[in-house]
Amino acid sequence: MSAMRGLGIRALHHELAEGRLTASDLIQDSLAAIETADGRVGAFLHVTRERALTQASAGEGVSGVPAPARGLLAGIPFAAKDNLCVEGVPTTCASRILEGYVPPHTATAVRRIETAGGVLIGKANLDEFAMGSSTENSGFHPTHNPWDLTRVPGGSSGGSAAAVAAGFVPYALGSDTGGSIRQPAAFCGVVGLKPTYGLVSRFGLVAFASSLDQIGPLTRSVEDAAIVLQGIAGWDELDSTSVQVDIPDYLASLTGDVAGLRVGVPAEYFETDMDQGVRDRVMEALDTLRRLGAEVRTIRLPHTRYALSAYYLIAPAEASSNLARYDGVRFGVRANDAPNLLAMYERTRSAGFGPEVKRRILIGTYALSSGYYDAYYKRAQQVRTLIRQDFQTAFAEVDVIVSPTTPTPAFRFGEKADPLTMYLNDIYTIPVNLAGLPAISVPCGLQDGLPVGLQLIGRPFDEPTLLRAAHAYEQAAGFSGLRPTALGEVQ
Amino acid sequence: MEFETVIGLEVHVELRTRTKIFCSCAVEFGAASNSRVCPVCLGSPGVLPVLNEEALKLGIRAALALSCEVRRSSKFDRKNYFYPDSPKAYQISQYDEPIGERGCVVIAGTSAPRSIGITRIHLEEDAGKLTHSPFGDASLVDLNRVGIPLIEIVSEPDLRTPDEARQYLEEIKSILQYCGVSDCRMEEGSLRCDANISLRPVGQATLGTKTELKNMNSFRNVVRGLEYEQERQRAVLMAGGAIVQQTLRFDEATGTTIVMRSKEDAHDYRYFPDPDLPRIELTQAYLDARRAEIPELPAQMRARFEQAYGLPTYDALVLTSTQRLARFFDVAASQAVDPKAVSNWLMGDVLGYLKEMGEDIDAQPMRPEQLAGLLRLIDDGTISTKIAKTVLRDMMTSGQDASAIIEQQGLVQISDEAALREIAERVIAANPKSVEDWRAGKEKALGSLVGQMMKETKGKANPQLVNRLIVDMLRD
């Protein structure tokens, strides 16, 4: 039986520090759980077994106890979404076009965790190049929701969310471009944090939409999210869009006190097509916050309805350029039967990319084309400014904004075959990326046995307030302790 | 019908930075293929560009030196295209907010000086180099050059002849070299030039249809290419034909132009702001600091040399051809009695000997103060001009002062009249035939006698004095 199941990072650190467990125990435990159950979940694309065992034993030293000075993450296993580069470890972005690609560099976020003694267990599945909301777009295999194996885990960080929910790892790193951390966290009943744009270095994150992408943790608790954020946040000379700000003590912000906190509820979000069960859970969560002394009020975000359209121009436009380098010349797969250069490009990209990636490259290419730029890309950027201003106005009156993370709980495989229906799943998360704000999804109960996520949105770089509110709610509501049962014994 | 030629140039110049524009790879010419590369310039998945501030500084310095207005706020854009010379499949460049705009340079022109407008200067990264292999159907890709910082300088269509285009290039090169922005070596590709050329009937205001000329790898070939294209277009127009808007490649071997692509094949580069790079925001203080880095420019130096030293325009032009030569002259001339003599010596013997040695003025050991010293020794009669030429060569090899060389080798001119008279008597006595010839009116005979004198004195006799003495003595 697992030694680490159910324990948070701080508790695991305590066990290591007291010598009751070793880092190798944790790695073995994690590997065993993956071996037992990942065949049914499919959270991982690649398990770094040998690398992890070597690192764990190296970190233990003679006594088998990692030095407490190395911090809370030392000796603790984690998973990284497979769009985060790790030197010497295959990185595919769940795309056939990058099959066999082994990067020569490590993402700053991963490097910081490894420097702190964290041990990478494997690379988690995702929608190809992080484009999707169900992980069904993985070029290799789907990931199943540990709460109900017939349902999707969400996406695009579906592998990361499922790995945490299934108990394979205490935490995982994901990336969030339009909700890709928060939505799968909501579907899998875990905590998912998207930091403020610029707080965490994007170096080593394979770009989808550069102005929207941000790396963040998927964890079992808000406290764990704070601990991981502490480990990865901060300016990086390798990323010019990372911001030079003082990094506060996130754990210290978890006071449990939200008395007087002003909580805004955007009216526009509740005017959309929302599952009744989700609506009920969110209303209950607002009651909980009121009970804790928060002041809940309705706010307006008038340009919300344009967010999805703006996002589906800006993100594909950037993606069309970011993904142009996968041309078969230098890395990944190449079509070798082509008679000339152009045919090589066409055949490589036709065979290497999946349909959703192609769809977005086409949309983005079109939006940037001469004669269409002003009507599409430029206008979308103008809408983005308006959305950012909506939030600025709202944050003059409230400290955090609360909404559902998704309109529905996890859906079944193939249920949202129409791309537009799929895109609507991110309707509450996308505006946050357009505005560059921090947001977190925390479990707020079950609906028909499936987790529901509560989204809290904060001011830029005000992760302390965001985490304080999420933590206070979590402690009062107690849903973060809920574990899925679909995997039986392994749980 | 009479036609007027209209030419505009696009000049790419590599900036003289130690490292590339968005990564820390070394910038070196001639390194082994694909040895100056890293994940960032190779466009590996997940990497990000970080602007090298030195490239920005040099770009701004260049813009200011070319009299451009510098934008306080600008940005980088992505120029998207698929080709193996671009590993990211886009080039980071500047599209609608270039760092510099509305500049100019003055050229000598065909008959009178002309100001040539500069539309814009923008920063960008260089692409890789493709070699289409003579073996089979493979192409070889060298990515060392990817990410080397460039500025592109776009001129207004203000040039009217191929020679004006050359003058413009020379002036740009000279200014950028003076500023330390680039070494502008066209043969190494650190200065590259594309040209747009069109013809229009004299008096017509609108521009004719242009063609774009590429692949001219020397100033001479720029002139050759433009002259060929000018005549080709003239012939087409004279025959009643129309010019097709095309991109042409100059073929050095045949001296002709070859069609690369027509307008219909033009790329849509889908420019958009690069989300990986923050906007460039410059303070006035920052711009002032860049302006302070600009040294005296060639045009200013030429004007000063003409005014302060009374040099002819041609001398000023030759002496300012490189900053090192100009500075050498400036120091020497300021210490010499006759600046024009300094100019003569520099343009004549010094440049001549440098050419022989295949060296640059700074590579030889003689300092300008020493050249001025040599000239003083001629002026005060210590040595003759002829001896000075020998001494100069020694100075340019050994770096010793002229006076030291003269002393060591006993080269001091003999101006002692009594001593010379004694030798002259001997020479006259020993050469009755020459004396007879001279008295018979053969002027040449004097030369022979003077030559004998110089031989006797190992060239040290003061030539003017010798001349006067012999004539006086023969008349007696």
Image: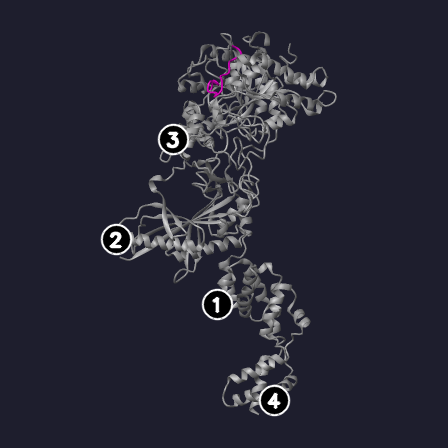
Tag of residue A366: 3
- Amino acid type at circle 3 is Tyr
Mark earlier in primary sequence (4, 2): 2
Q: Which residue is mark 1?
A: B312
Q: Secondary structure at mark 4?
A: helix
Query: Mark 3 or 2, which is nearer the eye?
Result: 2
Q: Amino acid at mark 4?
A: Ala
Distance from disc 1 to disc 2, alpha carbons, whole Å, reads 46 Å
- State the residue in front, A32 or A313: A32
CA distance separating discs 3 and 2: 43 Å
**Residue A392 visible in this rendered orientation of the protein:** no
Do discs 4 and 1 belong to a common subunit? Answer: yes
Tell me the number on the disc at residue B239.
Answer: 2
User: Which quadrant of the rendered structure holds the C terminus of chain B?
Assistant: bottom right
Q: Residue furthest front?
A: B135
- Determine whether, in the image, residue B401 is placed left or right of residue A400: right
